[in-house]
Image (cartoon, rainbow, N blue to C red):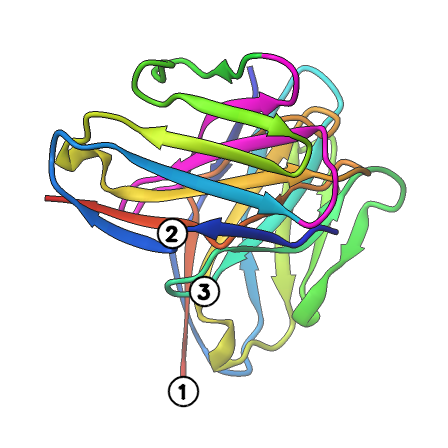
Amino acid sequence: AQSVTQLDSQVPVFEEAPVELRCNYSSSVSVYLFWYVQYPNQGLQLLLKYLSGSTLVKGINGFEAEFNKSQTSFHLRKPSVHISDTAEYFCAVSEEGGKLIFGQGTELSVKP
Amino acid sequence: SAVISQKPSRDICQRGTSLTIQCQVDSQVTMMFWYRQQPGQSLTLIATANQGSEATYESGFVIDKFPISRPNLTFSTLTVSNMSPEDSSIYLCSVVPGGGTQYFGPGTRLLVL
């Protein structure tokens, strides 16, 4: 069975600092990987996705993630965060476009 | 991509009543899903709703509690039946229009008193 583990429930960081949100997954088959962001009182917005090809994927708002098959990881990074990046971030996995399995979420809090 | 709308956006309901949530998509899609997000929690899949067949429910969710309709390729409803305070959650629908990416509606925020 698939599962997703987000290793940090909360990540506080100062504005303009770099950030990494960690995500590990387990699956016995090839998977698609996603990062979604949820701003306060809003729905989920797709940040980026890995379906195949290059293991480094770039998304919106300056975020990027790297798929590491040997370590079964898909960590999310941004070199310099803004106050507006404060939100909940969810890592998710699916088998070829089917149902998504979500991690528990990481609350990113950017402080001035 | 896909543009998804949900109605209502939020509601406050009394225990023992039922609420039907609507999900409308701007294009025809085969795969549609319903998720629940309990307060402070992640998202959990309730069921997969494909047009022309009965919904497929995940472990812990049953049709009597969460009946789903999927009359066509752009619309679905989820009913939360005989509600209790434990049903207070955000309910989201999502679709896969193609290419493996899932897009979400804005969610319905439900509070059961």
The furthest residue to the right? A53
Q: Is residue B38 left or right of residue B95?
A: left
Q: Is residue B81 left or right of residue A17?
A: left
Question: In the rendered structure, does residue A92 fall within the stretch colored magenta?
Answer: no
Whether labels 1 and 3 belong to a single chain: the reply is yes
Pick whichever of labels 1 and 3 is earlier in the sequence. 3
Quadrant of the rendered structure where residue A81 is?
bottom right
Q: Mark 2 — residue? A: B8
Q: Residue at x 47, y 81 (%)?
A: A83
Q: Residue at x 85, y 37 (%)?
A: A52
Quadrant of the rendered structure where residue B38 is?
top left
Given the image, on which type of amino acid does mark 2 rest?
Pro
Mark 3, other Cα within 10 Å: few <14 / some 14–19 / many ≥20: some
Rendering coords of residue B107 (x, y %): 44, 50
Rendering coords of residue A92 (x, y %): 58, 38
Q: Mark 1 — residue? A: A112
Q: Determine whether A64 is above or below B32 in the image.
A: below
Secondary structure at badge 1 equals loop
Rendering coords of residue B98 (x, y %): 80, 37
